[in-house]
Image (spheres, rainbow, N blue to C red):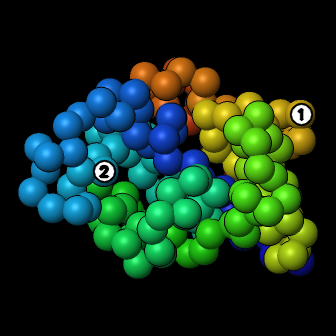
């Protein structure tokens, strides 16, 4: 069993808030710069990284469009102090096909990864409601699209789960 902390990370609604969704992509100079994260969310995330030193597994739909190398370039440009180590398996379009099944799919992909890799200490951070499938000891929701991970109390909840 692997006891190092793992974070299953969503991007939109966690690191990129609704303020970033509406920026004109033509404003940026290159491919990577159009994917700006919220600076305050990055600060909070980096504080979590510093205290927990987790393995980052991308569970976000971004995995459908970008490989790990490009994701890590986007992390670097946004001053994230870690790298994406891996991505969850993709069951979208095969086992899950309806937008109504998006949350089911995300939770299933995370649980499959946890099972296949025998992970004990893990947490999923997502703006989707995965609580029907993931217990509160393994899931933090960032329900406010304009705040993401910087929402009051979220950082402490994450640290309490990963450090205990």
Is 81 displayed left or right of 102 in the figure?
A: left
Q: Quadrant of residue 56?
A: bottom right
> Which residue was labeled with disc 2?
35
> Which residue was labeled with disc 1?
132
- Position of 66 relative to 123 (above/below): below
Q: Residues within 10 Å of mark 2 (few under 14, many from 20)?
A: some
Question: Which percent across, then down, holds residue 131?
Answer: 83, 33
Is 52 displayed left or right of 149 in the figure?
A: right
Question: Which percent across, then down, holds residue 53?
Answer: 56, 64
Question: Which percent across, then down, holds residue 35?
Answer: 30, 51
Q: Are marks 2 and 1 in contact (CB under 8 Å)?
A: no
Q: Quadrant of residue 102?
A: top right
Residue 38 in view (yes/no): yes
Q: Quadrant of residue 70?
A: bottom left
Could you say whether the residue bearing mark 1 is in a helix, strand or loop?
A: loop
- Name the residue at 64% across, 44% down: 125
- Position of 92 relative to 127 (above/below): below
Residue 121 in view (yes/no): no
Q: CA distance from mark 2 to mark 1?
A: 30 Å
Question: Which percent across, then down, holds residue 77?
Answer: 25, 61
Q: Quadrant of the N terminus?
A: bottom right
| Most foreground residue, 9 or 94 | 94
- Position of 72 relative to 164 (above/below): below
Could you say whether the residue bearing mark 2 is in a helix, strand or loop?
A: loop
- Name the residue at 58% across, 53% down: 60
Is 73 displayed left or right of 96 in the figure?
A: left
| Most foreground residue, 139 or 26 | 26
**Which mark is first along the chain, 1 or 2?**
2
- Name the residue at 14% across, 46% down: 26
């Amino acid at each position: 069993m692997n006891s190092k902390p793992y974070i299953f990370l969503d991007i939109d609604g966690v690191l990129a808030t609704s303020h970033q969704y509406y920026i004109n992509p033509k404003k940026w100079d290159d491919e990577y710069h159009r994917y700006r994260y919220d600076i305050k969310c990055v600060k909070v995330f980096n504080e979590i990284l510093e205290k927990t030193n987790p393995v980052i597994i991308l569970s976000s739909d971004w995995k459908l469009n970008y490989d790990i190398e490009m994701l890590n370039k986007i992390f670097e440009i946004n001053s994230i102090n870690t790298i994406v180590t891996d991505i969850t398996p993709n069951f979208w379009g095969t086992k899950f096909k309806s937008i109504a099944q998006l949350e089911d799919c995300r939770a299933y992909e995370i649980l499959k990864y946890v099972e296949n890799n025998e992970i004990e200490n893990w947490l999923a951070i997502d703006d989707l409601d995965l609580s029907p499938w993931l217990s509160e000891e393994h899931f933090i929701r960032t329900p406010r699209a304009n705040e993401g991970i910087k929402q009051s109390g979220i950082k402490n909840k994450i640290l309490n789960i990963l450090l205990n």
